[in-house]
Image: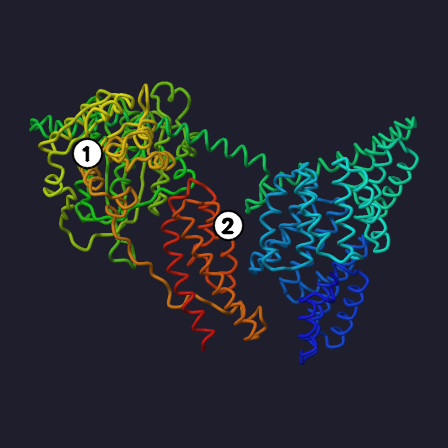
Amino acid sequence: MNITESSKFLELQNKYNQASTEKEKIILLVEMTLEVRNFDHDRALEMAEEIITRSQAIDFQLGIGEGLNHKGACYWMMSEYDEGLHQLTQAYTIARDIENLALEAKVLNNFGRIYRNLGDLAHALKNFEDALEINEKIGNVLNQTINLTNISNLYYDLNDYDTGLEYALKCLPIFEEYKDDSKLFSIYNTLGDIYFKKEDYDEALHYFKLIYDFFDPDSLQRSVAESGLGKVYYKLKNTKKAHDYLSSALKKAEHLRNPEAEIVALYYLGRLEFQSGNYRLALERVNAAYHIAQETLRRHDLMSIHEFLSNLHERMGDIPKAFFHLKEFEKHKEDIFQQATFNKLRNLQVKNQMFVAQKEKEIAEKTAHLKQQFMANMSHEIRTPMNAIVGFTDLLLQKDPKPDQLRYLNAIKQSSDNLLVIINDILDLSKIEAGKIEIEHIDFSFREMIQSVKEVMSIKADEKKLDFNFKIDDQIPDRLVGDPTRINQILINLIGNSVKFTDKGFVEVRVHSKEIEQNDNQIEITFDVEDTGIGISKEYVAKIFESFTQAGTDTARKFGGTGLGLTISKQLVDLMSGSITVESELGKGTTFTFSIPIKVADQQHITVKENKVTQETRNRLSNISILLVEDNEFNRMVAEDTLKSMINPIHLTVAVNGEEAIEKVKEQDFDLILMDIQMPVMNGVDATRYIRSKMPDNKNNIRIIAMTANVLEEDVRNYLNAGMNAYISKPFQTDELLLKIDLVMQGYSENEMREFVKEEKPKVELPEHIVDTSFLDSFTSGDEEKKEKYIKMFLVNGPKLLENINKSLIEENYEALRVAAHSMKPQLSYMGVKEEISNIFLIEQAASTNAHYERLETLIEQLNFVCEKAFDELSTIISS
């Protein structure tokens, strides 16, 4: 096709003819030059000169900068790099002087292109990165994609074809959407080259043929396509087609002064002659390619040419020349390798995941998988015995224990409950790594919490015959609003340490408070935990809150433990906006002090928590027939006794593995199965799959609840995908077990149950106006028509992207969700919707890591509110 006949060029030309001011005409001329630039360098240079001359006449600095940028790009394409850098340097100075980010990004991108051709990959990457950052900031999606295509080409230069392909394929649909001929040529050529290097010759042919079929026979693009097709057919051993395409490409490239196609054509024509034994003619061809590559400083081409010339001269018996070219090849290769190493190290510092080296990605995925396996196993091993402890404690509490027994049982129950909370946080490694432990704000009795801590810890203190005292400031209100479990956890950690490291003397807890100025409803509570134990040396005091730290290896050997408790305590205190310190003297004792701000409850009375398991629930479950599948004897006893004590009458049958469960289901009918997961002979997942797929219709729809110690999100998805209706974690709470059985019997799904039991979320509060059109006003220079055009584009694209995000969340297609969020991010920014309101960047990041998937539902719920309001506001703007 002829560029001056293209629809876009004709459209721009028509606008140019209708433009009323010189500035408008110059801006349109800049766009027309961009259309011409990739097809006719000489014509584009003339147009760039015209832009500069006309802009100087009216002192239009932006026009001068755009013209200089075009000249720099033309010289890049003509391999006149020194002149190109000179023009771009002037353009960059103007862009910075007039503070035009769009022009600055264009210039930086062209700097990167020249440095890439010069083989200076470090400078190329730096310029592409800087351009990308600016385009992300101003929300220019098309130019971001151009930057990413260039970065993809860098990966190609570094022989990292998989990563280069990954980002080229992400760029392709955006260029196709914009229907930009020059950009499509660029991405098709990149994809053709990458597939060629990956030896996927069918795909390489596909993309080179797209260029060949689309562009005019006498165009630069056609010469590049023909050189690409020629080298592919060379690899496919189709000598005739290879020779025809390469000869045609060479003729066009020489006429159009296109060194890239000229070098490729000469190089592969030389290889064809080499294959035929025509060494002299091969040398003539490749030497010609060598001189062009030297003149245009194309380092990557020189490296390949030196390697081939070394082999060619060796075959011709000229060993000195063969050795010379071999040394030159090794030198160029070493330079490239050093830059590759340097760039891959730099990639680790770049915030966007697209720069991360493929190898690191593979290692991270493998590490995450190993962590998940370890955490799942650890969860099961800890929760299985905990299930017995919690279950038997609950059962004993129902047996009318004596007062002293009740005290011990309550202490066991409190300890178990606290331990389960701690286990949940420690096992969820992602929460700790991401600092995602959430602090609750609930109404609680401060003195009840202190009493429970005292009862739990006094048993240990009594065993060591220590004086154990609490001194509580009477001025502290009883009803507070905060996180009693976390405060309890911190106190148990600190008091536990004191008791552990104190052999004689005392452990004393002092609690006092003070009002926080300018906030009548908040107080600051300070806890001092003092002991007369072994103390901590000065060298360890400074790092005592670091992970896995204890006061020396002798201490660790004598007292055991991981040293994780103090780290968790500090994290929790920090999360509650508090502070924690330690004072200690070796051999004399230690005092830990932590202070937290906390809200005083409006009403100082006890609120009774409503029990969700009612008599109506028990009545519905009366006479239920349950198959309990559990291999652990203690867990079986706990579940049997719990169910029999809570549901009367109940028909309970027991199986000890999945195979036995299947036989029981074949023999009799059950209303529900409580299925353990990890069992000998056959596990619970396989048993469930068998029941769902191989049992007759009257058996295969039986309701199944997983009873499992493995409650990581990935495990739960596996259970539900196998056909289970719901799950309950071990150790289970009695009320939760009965509630889930009741809801499953009523036909609720696991997701619906979560909705049923969770507290109603507060309505998202949004500011009065969330759209800010000041950026659009600036970007369009106050042109209302352009502004309305961009808003209408967003009102078309935005709802589609939002629909994709919501659909992907439901389908758990997190990669599609991430891509949709990434596309929406600059568009929201364009419309002036701030990140702190939309959280679109957080959504994109959360969808990138499985540890953060659980955050998505809340974030996307907020996004829906934001978009609904943004769509309304923008619709009002364009209709007014």
Quadrant in which the N terminus is drawn = bottom right
Does the rendering let one see residue 106?
A: yes
In terms of depth relative to the viewer, which is nearer, 303 or 470? 303
Residue at image coords 55%, 75%? 785
Side of 814 relative to 532 (left or right): right
In terms of depth relative to the viewer, which is nearer, 189 or 576? 189
**In the drawing, what numbered circle is on residue 819?**
2
Please, what secondary structure does the residue beneath circle 1 have? loop
Seen in the picture, residue 298 relative to 14 is either above or below; the reply is: above
Label 2 crowd (10 A; few <14 / some 14-19 / many >=20)? some
The three-letter amino acid code for the residue at tag 1 is Asp
Quadrant in which the C terminus is drawn = bottom left
In terms of depth relative to the viewer, which is nearer, 398 or 310? 310
Q: Which residue is mark 1?
A: 671
Residue at image coords 70%, 40%? 196
The three-letter amino acid code for the residue at tag 2 is Val
For the image, the number of numbered tags is 2
Side of 426 relative to 227 (left or right): left
Q: How is the image coloured?
A: rainbow
- Which callout, 1 or 2, points at the residue further toward the start of the chain? 1
Seen in the picture, residue 165 relative to 39 is either above or below; the reply is: above
The image position of residue 104, as x and y in percent, is 66, 60
The image position of residue 439, as x and y in percent, is 31, 45
